[in-house]
Amino acid sequence: MNIQSYDISRQASAATLIFDAIREAIIKGDLTLGEPLRQEDIARAFNVSRIPVREAL
């Protein structure tokens, strides 16, 4: 078998990437106090299911 291997152990999980993006949006002021965070909208923005979004939140 000739398959290119990758060390994915050093890659961030989807939940971590989403968490970091939400955190950054809060810090920048793109998300404001009291603004609802809808799992469906976030999942769609990251092209993932709601599971990693729930983990991030």
Image (cartoon, rainbow, N blue to C red):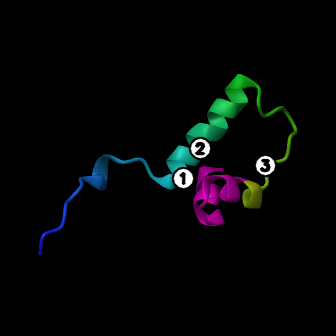
Task: Write the residue at 19% across / 61% down.
Answer: 4
Q: Which residue is at the far front? A: 2
Mark positioned earlier in the residue sequence (3 or 1):
1
Is mark 1 in CB contact (under 8 Å) with mark 2? yes
Q: Residue at label 3?
A: 37
Which disc, if any, is residue 15? 1
Q: Considering depth in this image, is 41 or 36 the residue closer to the camera?
A: 41
Q: Residue 46, position in %: x, y?
A: 61, 53
* CA gap, disc 3 and disc 1: 15 Å
Q: Residue 54, position in %: x, y?
A: 65, 58
Mark positioned earlier in the residue sequence (3 or 2):
2
The answer to whether 32 appears left or right of 50 in the picture is right
* CA gap, disc 1 and disc 2: 6 Å
Q: Of helix, strand and loop, which one carries label 3?
A: loop
Task: Write the residue at 24% across / 53% down.
Answer: 7
Task: Write the residue at 67% across / 58% down.
Answer: 43
Q: Residue at label 2?
A: 19
Residue 56 covered by magenta stretch = yes
